Amino acid sequence: MTLSEEAKERLADIVELQPTKNSALQDRWEMESGSDVHQYLESELKEYYYRDENSLIRATAEARAIVTGEEPEGPTEVYMSDLERKVFAVAPGPDEDTESVVSVLHRLQDEYGDDLADEDGEEPSAKDVRRALQTLKRKGVVELVYRTVPTFRLAVEREDVAIAEE
């Protein structure tokens, strides 16, 4: 995707201000509302940002590379929720066969057992795992491969990702 000069400048703002909110970008970009910011992000920068578990706007590794003009050195820092961290830990590696959402859920159950439940004692459902995998896909660390059912695997080696603390 080719970015206009305005889009590149705004992407640089996201990299500089992250984690940030619509309101901060609204002020920086002199827009009328947070809705205008959201619309711009979705129409022009969808591939270059994501929202973390606190709904804060963050730049993808690709966005940071575009802004700085260089590939990041060392592991890519990625913000992950607790479930996303666990899914990332058990998802098949980049050289392994892809697996379905249900298969990843079974891996989670095998690996974490009773430690898988959240504060309320609820274990994640297939829907929760699908959401985590899709979020990790948007963050660039998981890839989706369509077979009979959608399947996933890591897009990068685990050691190439540093899981950022909140």
Image (spheres, grey):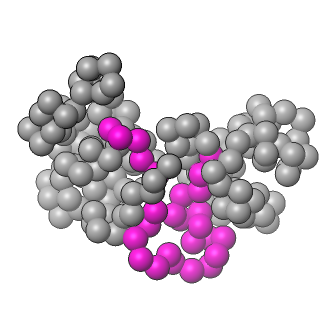
- Above or below — where is 112 with respect to 143? above
Residue that lies at the very extreme toward the front in this rendered image: 119
- Above or below — where is 68 with respect to 89? below
- Image location of residue 55, percent across then percent down: 58, 37
Name the residue: 23% across, 61% down. Answer: 94
- Above or below — where is 156 with respect to 125? below
Residue placed most toward the observer, 87 or 120: 120
- Image location of residue 70, percent across then percent down: 57, 80
- Image location of residue 50, percent across then percent down: 55, 46
Name the residue: 59% across, 56% down. Answer: 59
Residue that lies at the very extreme toward the left in this rendered image: 110
Asked if the stretch drawn in magenta spans residue 73, the answer is yes
> For the N terminus, which image quadrant?
bottom right
Q: What is the quadrant of residue 125 in the picture?
A: top left
Name the residue: 32% across, 59% down. Answer: 155
* Residue 120 relative to residue 91: left or right: right
- Regarding residue 67, the answer to whether it shows in the image is yes
Asked if the stretch drawn in magenta spans residue 87, the answer is no
The residue range painted magenta reads 57-83
* Residue 160 relative to residue 94: left or right: right
How many labels sit on residues? 0
Name the residue: 28% across, 50% down. Answer: 88
- Image location of residue 108, percent across then percent down: 17, 38
Residue placed most toward the observer, 46 or 127: 127
- Regarding residue 103, the answer to whether it shows in the image is no
- Above or below — where is 66 with respect to 120? below
